[in-house]
Image: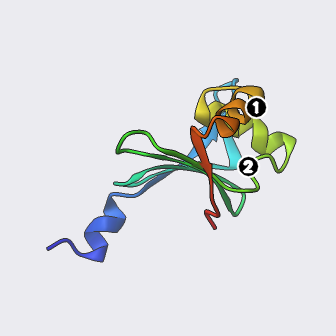
Amino acid sequence: METKTNTIRLVKVSNMVSSSGREVPNQFEIRTPDGVYFQSYDTIIAFISCNGGKRILDPDWAYSVTTGKYRNQFLGETKKETEQKIKLGEYIIQNLN
């Protein structure tokens, strides 16, 4: 039986990295057994599941320019591409906080 301690060991948090290769404060990737989260400051913005790559965006996914820059990096696409995928139903909008 897996304990909470073992589960916590499987969670890894790292700062996003800028184009210059430096860690960016307040922008995080959180890797869990279920998938990867993108967190900007105290808000979870996006989630990509391990099973099938399901993508969920928080309603605040387009909160600010800085959040957008690192969200785009996390998703590997532009804001316009993200908007199109939301429109097509490829991404789910759901409260992640």
**Would residue 8 appear left or right of 41 to someone viewing this image?**
left
Looking at the image, which residue sits at the far front?
Answer: 88
| Residue 79 marker | 1
Say if 7 sits above or below 71 in the image. Answer: below
Amino acid at the residue labelled 2 = Trp
Quadrant placement of the N terminus: bottom left
Q: Position of residue 27 (x, y in %)?
A: 67, 48
| Residue 6 marker | none
Query: Which of the two discs, 1 and 2, labels the residue nearer the N terminus?
Result: 2
Mark 2: secondary structure: loop
Q: Residue at x 19, y 71 (%)?
A: 2
Looking at the image, which residue sits at the far right?
Answer: 65
Q: CA distance from mark 1 to mark 2?
A: 10 Å
| Residue 61 marker | 2
Q: Position of residue 80 (x, y in %)?
A: 77, 28
Quadrant placement of the C terminus: bottom right
Amino acid at the residue labelled 1 = Lys
Q: Residue at x 23, y 75 (%)?
A: 3
Crowding at label 1, few (<14), some or many (≥20) Cα neighbours within 10 Å?
A: some
Q: Position of residue 60 (x, y in %)?
A: 76, 55
